[in-house]
Image (cartoon, rainbow, N blue to C red):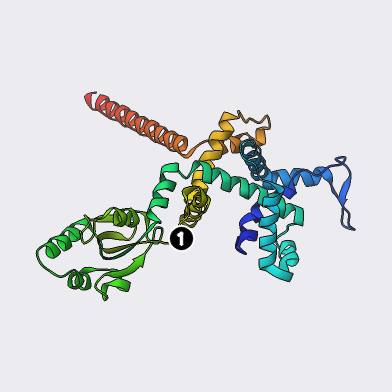
Amino acid sequence: MKKTVLSLTLAASVLALGACSGGDSKAIVTSKVGDISVADFNKKAKALTGSYVMQQLVTEKVLADKYEVTDKEIKEAYDTTASQFGEGFTQALAESGLTEQGFKDSLRVQLLQEKALKDQAIKEEDVKKYYEQMKTELNGRHILVADEKTAKEVIEKIKGGAKFEDVAKEYSTDTGSAQKGGELGWFSVGAMVDEFNDAAYALELNTLSEPVKSSFGYHVIEITEKRDVKGVGAFKDEEENIRSTMLNKLNQTGEAQAILKDIIAKMAKDANVKTSDKDLKDSLEFFTTTSEEQAKAAEEAAKKAEDKAAKEDSEDKAEDTDKESK
């Protein structure tokens, strides 16, 4: 884990703001200007963080029913972070509003989430495909352009006899490789965006790809060499590392949180999670609604609004017609 783990798990420390124990009238803070009772604290804590704390507790409850995080795993994650911060770790915890136990509790939730993502967000067939691809390195080149029409024009020029490197220098918007004739050098699985990666690994040697769309534009790819990678273990030995690599990529792209929300929403529904607290009801309902259900509800609401507007417009026209006839 990186040093950013403190900031990433800081929100989970809000769990510490949960209800305080003791009689409601008991003071937990005293001062010359007035005391703060347990009831005052609990009321404010609920108003400020109640929804978040509830969501975190539900997350932990539903995930812990299916996945296990051992004390050893928590200790390893904790020790890794502590060693990275060194002597400043205790101060960093204090500045983040975390106790040692609070940080361990937040790590437990984080590790549960990672296990759920590795299990449900990463498909077995994708892991196996990654494993097969990691046995081979590719040497290739590409030409990046803005649109499909230009990509097809590039392909026609090369097939018509133009040299790949000359066309790359003329057309490619990838400034890093264009002046090198589009050369990318050797690369392995995961080094390129997914669309590029899969197209490159599927290509026969010295064959132009069709236009490959990615977030950068349209690529025309050619693989010129392939070589075996030494030291790749058996699938069972590599699987966990592959899943971790794929999870890191989901985190980097920001996809992980959206996927995780849907995973937890479905698991919470299956567990029939409900609340009798009217202040938390709306928050729980949103938390247990998947993105697909939210999109469908939004679509239905938009359709109702459209139908209502059309009906009102029709009624207005009918009223105008009636007035004119009179």
**Extreme-bottom residue of the structure:** 179
At mark 1, the secondary structure is loop
In the picture as drawn, the residue positioned furthest to the left comes out as: 160
Quadrant assignment for the N terminus: bottom right
Q: Nearer the viewer, residue 127 or 182?
A: 127
Residue 176 locus on image (x, y percent): 32, 73
Q: Residue at x 30, y 72 (%)?
A: 177
- Residue 325: percent from the left, percent from the top? 22, 24
Disc 1 crowd, CA 10 A, few/some/many (<14, 14-19, 20+): few
Q: Is residue 260 shown above or below 277?
A: below
For the point 74% across and 49% down, the residue is: 16
Name the foreground residue: 208 vs 312: 208
Q: Nearer the viewer, residue 183 or 42?
A: 183
Q: Quadrant of the C terminus?
A: top left
Residue 286 visible in rendering: no
Tell me if I can see residue 5 in this picture: yes
Q: Left of 107 or right of it: where is 189?
A: left
Q: Tell me the residue that label 1 is attached to.
A: 231
Q: Residue at x 67, y 48 (%)?
A: 108
Residue 162 location, x and y as percent?
12, 69
Quadrant hosting residue 161: bottom left
Q: Position of residue 263 (x, y in %)?
A: 53, 39
Residue drawn at 62 percent across, 40 percent down:
67
Give the camera-side residue of 9 and 126. 126
Left/right of residue 90 with respect to residue 114 in the rendered view = right
- For badge 1, the amino acid type reads Gly
